[in-house]
Image (cartoon, helix red, strand yellow):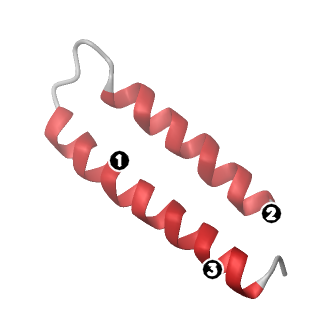
Amino acid sequence: MNNLILTVLLLGLLLMMLLAPFSALALLMIVVLVSAIGWTVWQLLVTLVKGDT
């Protein structure tokens, strides 16, 4: 569960970096954000199916 909290915090930080007004690497940040969201959803599904270990 601690890993899940860290993941959600990291996702929030990535979202803040994406929404920064002077982000020169906005396209790269969109790719990173989409992959982080996908990984988070995958981890949530794995946790729901297998249970917290």
Q: Is residue 1 left or right of residue 10?
A: right
Disc 1 target residue: 33
**Mark 2 crowdedness (10 Å alpha carbons): few <14, some 14-19, many ≥20:** few
Task: Residue 1: give its label.
Answer: 2
Q: Amino acid at mark 2?
A: Met
Residue at 62% across, 41% down? 9
Nearer to us: label 2 or label 3: 3
What percent of the width, then of the height, locates residue 39?
A: 46, 66
> Measured along the vertical axis of the image, is residue 49 above or below residue 18?
below
Outermost right residue: 53
Helix, strand or loop for disc 3 = helix
In this rendering, the answer to whether 35 lies above or below 25 is below
Of residue 52 and residue 25, the one placed in the foreground of this image is 52
**Residue 43: assigned label:** none
> Quarter holding the N terminus?
bottom right
Measured from the top left, where is residue 52 in percent x and y?
Answer: 82, 76
Mark toward the start of the polypeptide (3 vs 1): 1
Nearer to the camera, 22 or 50: 50
Residue type highlighted by circle 3: Val
Q: Earlier in the sequence, mark 1 or mark 2?
A: 2
Name the N-terminal-most of marks 2 and 3. 2
Q: Are marks 2 and 3 in contact (CB under 8 Å)?
A: no
- Give the vertical position of 23 relative to 8 (above or below): above
Residue 10 % position (x, y)? 56, 44
* Discs 1, 2 touching: Cβ within 8 Å: no
Residue hosting label 3 = 46
**Image-quadrant location for residue 36:** bottom left
The kind of secondary structure element at disc 2 is: loop
